[in-house]
Image (tube, rainbow, N blue to C red):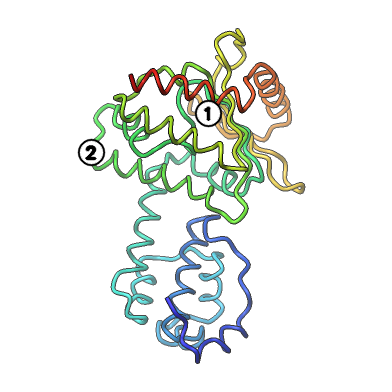
Amino acid sequence: MTIPPAMEQEAATEPTIPIDPYISPRIRFGTELRKFRLAAGFSQRKLSETIHLSISQLSMLENGHRSPTLALAGKVDEALNLGTTLTGLLDRLNRAEAQLPRWFRPWLDFEREAESLRIWEALIVPGLLQTEDYARAILSRKPRATAEEVEDKVAARMERQEILRKRMPPMLWIIMDEGILHRPVADPGVMRGQFERLLDTEEHLRISLQILPYTARNVLGLLGSFTLADLTRETHPVAYIDSQSLDDRVTDRPTDMRNLAFRYEAIRSDALSRHESLNLIKETMRRWTT
């Protein structure tokens, strides 16, 4: 979408917003709002006066420092003649977040802000690497789940993967148990598509995928999956523990962090190299194909 020439000089005088739209839903909405405002030839002052909102509040929206409402998004859509563009976007973002358990939502902020994520997965492909069909196969097994609920949850899981599209995505250090490659959670076509997604990580410089083979006889990972989020130097690392329990799934307690870091490194020491792991995935994929 082209910004009118008359707006180029004014846009240049507005504060630069060095933000990444995939950091959080608020920032993603704010980035889209600013893009459409400039494309429509509106200054912040003009849009503020049109929708009866202060310039400071509009600026906070565009910077992702204020959560938008559907009513406000509707006013902007009307002012900029966008139909339901922004209300539709906000509705999708809200629906995706609503599908996540309340205890999981605090983890999302850590996941989005992490410089690196160290992931140990014992049972299924990590959510950040799942295909839609693989995720759908897993989420549809929940008792009494309706088709609409399943699709909403699949959309939420795909929304989480937007962090991989950041200008500087987190480094993913992923270790998976070999059993995941053999567990038939769906039909062969779905499994083949999921394997292809795993093999795509070979071209991704910020994703390292390793497999813990059966032959390692490492039982430390059998206690459950977990993720360590390494944040900025000023912030302590945080862990997410995948468990049937509803208590203490997100923790930053020093004792927990030391124990989990030790466990992760002990598992990694027995894992196949990245090259060997990808070869094992290719070999297993051929079995699924035939």
Q: Pointer 2: residues within 10 angstroms few (<14), some, or many (20+)?
A: few
> Looking at the image, is 60 positioned above or below residue 281?
below
> Looking at the image, is 53 positioned above or below residue 143?
below
Q: Which residue is mark 2?
A: 147
x and y, in percent, of residue 79 in the image: 36, 82
x and y, in percent, of residue 122 in the image: 52, 21
- For the point 55% across and 10% down, which residue is it? 214
x and y, in percent, of residue 265 in the image: 70, 23
Secondary element type, mark 2: helix
Q: Quadrant of residue 86?
A: bottom left
| Disc 1 residue type (three-letter) | Asp
Secondary element type, mark 1: loop
Q: Is residue 99 left or right of residue 209?
A: left
| Disc 2 residue type (three-letter) | Ala
- For the point 40% across and 82% down, which residue is it? 51
- For the point 53% across and 47% down, which residue is it? 164
x and y, in percent, of residue 82 in the image: 33, 75
Of labels 1 and 2, earlier in sequence is 2
Q: Is residue 259 left or right of residue 55?
A: right
Q: Which residue is mark 1?
A: 247
Q: Nearer the viewer, residue 17 or 79?
A: 17
Residue 129 seen from this side? yes
